[in-house]
Amino acid sequence: MVVHQHGWRRGRAGEAVLAAGMAATFAAMSGCGGGATAGDDRPRADPAATVRAAADALARTGSARVRTAMEMATGGTRVTIRGEGGVDFRNRMGQLLVMLPADAAGKAEHRPITELLVPGALYMKNRGAGVPADKWVRVDVAGLADGNLVTGGATDPQAAAELLRGAQEVRYMGETELAGEKVRHYQGTTDIGRAAQSASPAVKGALEAAAKGFSKDTVPFDAYVDEQGRLRKVRHRFTYVNNGVIDVSSTTLLYGFGTPVNVVLPASGDIYAGKIAD
């Protein structure tokens, strides 16, 4: 999914790589006509400090299973791209299977796209657009105008957490339950540029690119943090212009903490070096 917003840099190599596969979602869209439960309302710490520290808590935990959902809305039409996988927060690596909507690629079925997330790069397999099925595409995320916050169809869970380092005007919304566990709900906005300044080296370049690419740095969010300070769920809401206003709600759910995550990068001979179909 490649997005072009007024004020975004265009013509970057990564944008050309992803254009055919994900932009079909927007074409399909344009062609188509949980609140917190009351609990202990007293936050145990400064709300902004709690949210900003969530990425560090995940690094201490080590790894987790993740589910992602990216919902795009324009002209009354909604399309959702879902993903599932795992992330090693300590070693800054992850793997996702991203499922496109049936009509986004113009087919009844589309094979899930395998995405490998590593510092500075995104690897994709089964992305279509003329790429052989047994080959991978490698994208430099710092070369993407959005730093891969929305381009790949799922916000990198590491980046989703690190983006909260720029949290500001955070409000504690109360206690609720998530997958049977009590969590504390926080709501506010985060500043992409501010998050980039204090981000870990693994995602710093990506957030710096996003800070330059988006015309607005401010991103509203809802974050759910457990008793150990770990981020359990976060929803970011992005807005941009692409032949009309498009709203994107990107949700990352984290569970199964400590589950081993094995990411094997493709050999150089398995990376596609040919032309990507437009």
Image (cartoon, rainbow, N blue to C red):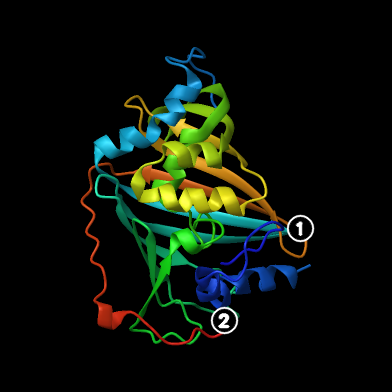
Within 10 Å of disc 1 (Cα), the crowding (few <14, some 14-19, many 20+) is few
Image position, residue 226 (x, y; %): 38, 28
131 and 200: which is toward the camera:
200
Say if residue 35 shows up in the picture.
no
Q: Amino acid at mark 2?
A: Lys
Q: Secondary structure at mark 2?
A: loop
What is the crowding at mark 2: few (fewer than 14 residues within 10 Å), some, or many (at least 20)?
few
Q: Determine whether, in the image, residue 26 is placed left or right of residue 229.
A: right
Question: Which residue is pictured at 44% across the width and 30% down the height?
Answer: 52
Q: Amino acid at mark 1?
A: Gly
Q: Earlier in the sequence, mark 1 or mark 2?
A: 1
Q: Which mark is residue 76?
A: 1
To which residue does mark 2 refer? 107
Q: Nearer the viewer, residue 158 or 14?
A: 14
In three-dimensional space, the C-alpha distance between marks 1 and 2, rounded to whole angstroms, equals 22 Å
Say left or right for 158 vs 211: left
